Image: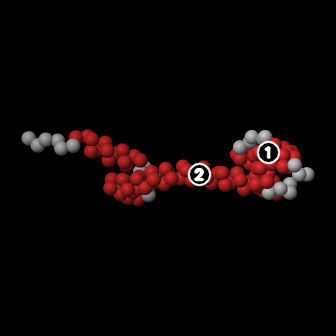
Amino acid sequence: MPRAADGTRRKDRRKKILNQAKGYWGRRSKLTRTAKDAVRRAGQYAYRDRKVRKREFRALWIARISAGARAHGMNYSRFMHGLQQAGVQLNRKALSNMAIEDPKGFESLVETAKSGLGTN
């Protein structure tokens, strides 16, 4: 009587890979070997891009703060240094949001930064 070589483990392992590849185009969602490569590569991209996303958001916030500061006659680095000297502790995300949604409040922060630098 022949014995079962791998039982359900083999099927489960392959099914898991195909479930992860659901929604992929063509053979990548149907064939185990191709799906395995696609899932592995997708995982690498996902891992890398979770870190890249943080960089990209920081760059976006800095660009928005810079635009808001320049509108009031100050560049980004002097603005941030002035806030630091004045003891204002707001993160870039909050400052960016303020530059977009509350221009009057952002203008008062620019004035605070200018006073922190000791210039008018």
Q: Secondary structure at mark 1?
A: helix
Q: Position of residue 59 (x, y in %)?
A: 67, 55
- From the viewer's perspective, tell me whether residue 102 is left or right of residue 52: right
Q: Type of residue at label 2?
A: Arg
Residue beneath disc 2:
53
Q: Position of residue 71 (x, y in %)?
A: 84, 56
Residue 68 visible in the shown view = no
Which residue sits at x=36%, y=44%?
16
Instruction: Determine the CA span between mark 1 and mark 2.
Output: 30 Å
Q: How many numbered dots are placed on residues in this image?
A: 2
Q: Position of residue 76 (x, y in %)?
A: 77, 55
Residue 86 visible in the shown view = yes
Mark drawn on residue 4: none
Q: Secondary structure at mark 2?
A: helix
**Which residue is outermost to the left?**
1
Mark drawn on residue 85: 1
Q: Type of residue at label 1?
A: Gln
Q: Count residues near mark 2 (Cα–Cα under 10 Å), then give few for <14, some for 14-19, many for 20+.
A: few
The disc, 1 or 2, on the residue closer to the chain's N-terminal end is 2
Which residue sits at x=11%, y=43%?
2
Depth check: give the residue in front, 79 or 39. Answer: 79
Q: Position of residue 94 (x, y in %)?
A: 73, 43
Depth check: give the residue in front, 16 or 82. Answer: 82
In which quadrant of the rendered image does the N terminus lie? top left
Depth check: give the residue in front, 27 or 79. Answer: 79
Which residue sits at x=64%, y=51%?
57
